[in-house]
Amino acid sequence: MDTDPAGPPDPPAPQVTPVTDPAARPASRTGRNLPVAIGVGALLGGLVLLTLLTIKATFLIYVGAALGIALTELAGGLAKRDIKIPVIPVAAGGLAVGACMYWLGYGWALAALGLTVLGIFAWRLPGGATGYVKDVTAGIFALIYLPVLASFVVAMLAPADGPRRVITFVILTVCSDIGGYAAGITLGRGGRHLMAPAISPKKTWEGFAGSVAAGLIGGALCLRFLLPGHVWAGLLTGAAAVLAAILGDLVESMIKRDLDIKDMGSLLPGHGGVLERLDSLLAAAPVVWVLLYVFIPAH
């Protein structure tokens, strides 16, 4: 009987089954779960249309809820740096600014803003001198960043054609996001040219070009079919909205870098926090309001 001097043959190596859990794979080149992100975005956009095209005042409730969540996220992020926002006066004053802007006009909204600042000063007094300046400053920053910028959306909503103005504003901002995302992952394949690597490493000049192109198209179409404006006015409004939206995105990225956090929150799957969805909208709101007011005066 023959024997093998090397001993019995080695057992076959066990087969490794590849991981098929979707949660274990990167969902896309940008690190987000794209189908979930699209679904959440569609839901948010659907709620915008539902409120605007039925009883437009209900859109104010939607905006107020989003701002309240964003304020909570911002307060939580700043708390990591031992900065405490006076949340209650900021929230109450923000609601007052928005309500005055919609029902009473700009003068009353400005008065509400001034009274809210005084309320922030007074609210923080019992907390002592330590950290007073930074907490009050953070409160005023939160007031301006969230409800005051959002009050320009409320100002767009107030006229008779307000729903169409707000829809135009939302479309232009969404065009900036979608155009930038699409161009960033396609045109950037041959070599990405980073736009502001020290602030947002995912921003590229390819994405910027896509945002501008989508914003120009969206502006021209909106002021041609949604509002009684000229195509050239739509092109200018679309370009300005894109620049403002990108600025808002960069500002929010800078805030997160300063606070050393990745996302402001995790409420919206595929997006992060609510503030991640509001950053570009907040920055674009005053720009779009001004241009629409000039090109299509509201009565």
Image (spheres, helix red, strand yellow):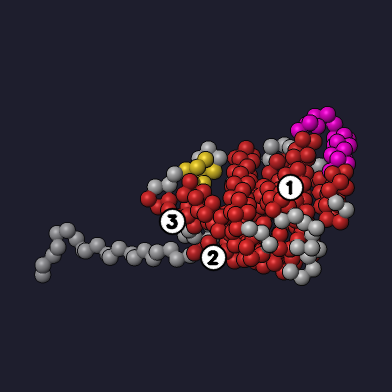
**Which sits in the foreground, 28 or 185?**
185
Pointer 2: what residue?
A: 35
| Separation of marks 3 and 2 at Cα, in angstroms | 18 Å
Q: Is residue 55 left or right of residue 175?
A: right
Per the model, the C-alpha gap separating discs 3 and 1 is 33 Å
In the figure, residue 117 lies in which quadrant? top right
Question: Is 83 inside the magenta-drawn segment?
Answer: no
Please give the name of the residue rendered at 53% of the width and 61% of the height, measured from the top-left corner: 34
At 54% across and 51% down in the image, what residue appears? 212
* Residue corresponding to mark 1: 149
Spatial separation of the CA atoms under disc 2 and disc 1: 30 Å
Secondary structure category for the residue under label 3: helix
- The answer to whether 11 appears left or right of 239 in the picture is left
The span shown in magenta is 112-135
Mark 3 vs 2, N-terminal side: 2
Q: Residue 209 appears at what percent x and percent y?
A: 49, 50
Dot 3 amino acid type = Thr
The mark found on residue 32 in the picture is none
Query: Do we see residue 276 in this rendering?
Result: no
Q: Magenta part mainly helix, strand or loop? A: helix
- Residue nearest the viewer, comparing 251 with 130: 251
Q: Position of residue 54 (x, y in %)?
A: 76, 70
- Secondary element at image label 2: helix
Q: Secondary structure at mark 1?
A: helix
**Nearer mark to the viewer, of 3 and 2:** 3
Instruction: Report crowding for label 2: few under 14, some 14 to 19, many 20 or more residues within 10 A (C-alpha).
Output: few
Q: Earlier in the sequence, mark 2 or mark 1?
A: 2
Q: Quadrant of the C terminus?
A: bottom right
Task: Please state which of residues 69 and 242 is positioned toward the viewer in this rendering.
Answer: 242
Kind of residue sitting beneath label 1: Leu
Q: Position of residue 259 (x, y in %)?
A: 64, 39
